[in-house]
Image (spheres, grey):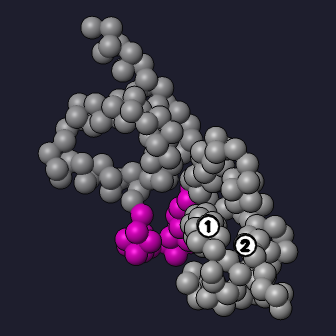
Amino acid sequence: MFTIGDLARRCRLSRSTLLYYDSIGLLRPSARTPAGYRQYDEDALSRLRRICGYRDVGLKLTEIKNILDGTRGRTAEVLEGRLESLNDEICRLREQQRVIVGLLRNRSKLRGARALDKERWVALLRATGLDDDDMRRWHVEFERMSPQGHRDFLQSLGIPEREIRRIRDWSRSAAGSSEQR
């Protein structure tokens, strides 16, 4: 059995965090001493580690409680939702990078932003020996294997939404015509 202090140290949390988790029903003590002190067993430690893992990926405490206390099938749904919100946030942050670089009016600052734009990506592909046909096949395969990933990647390059739709539509139609052969 662990005291609240032992458990807090093992998971690098504060005692007040564990008290809060108890108050919202997220992590209840396994037992109490005759003096009323909280005690936690290995199952509680395991649950707390899962809580910490879910917190590390940005889940809200209510979502974590629902996962841990609910049905297992909901876990994938909640994590997929979190992944989608992270993808959206990454897109917003990349757009903010591009705006800042534009405001600085210095394209060399884009290197410091650790972001690629369309021109640099195409130059990189050409430097590796890809020609226009190779790049088209690259788009077709990317769209076929991971449509949402393809869209996210094109957005990350700062390509306007209209052009992204055109590239993806072309990629899907090219994939369909090559499958018919």
Q: Amino acid at mark 1?
A: Asp
Report which quarter residue 135 is drawn in. top left
Image quarter hosting the C terminus: top left
Percent x, y of residue 105: 49, 72
| Mark 1 in CB contact with mark 2 (< 8 angstroms) | yes
Q: Chief secondary structure of the magenta span?
A: helix
Q: Is residue 2 left or right of residue 151?
A: right
The numbered mark at residue 43 is: 1
> Which sits in the foreground, 57 or 148?
57
Q: Amino acid at mark 2?
A: Ser
Question: Does residue 149 appear to the left or right of 137 in the view shown?
Answer: right
Kindly identify which residue carries mark 2: 30
Residue 13 within the magenta-colored segment of the rendering: no
Of 3 and 87, the residue lying toward us: 3
The magenta-colored residue range is 90-115
* Image location of residue 75, percent across then percent down: 63, 48
In the rendered image, the residue lying farthest to the left is 129
Q: Secondary structure at mark 2?
A: loop
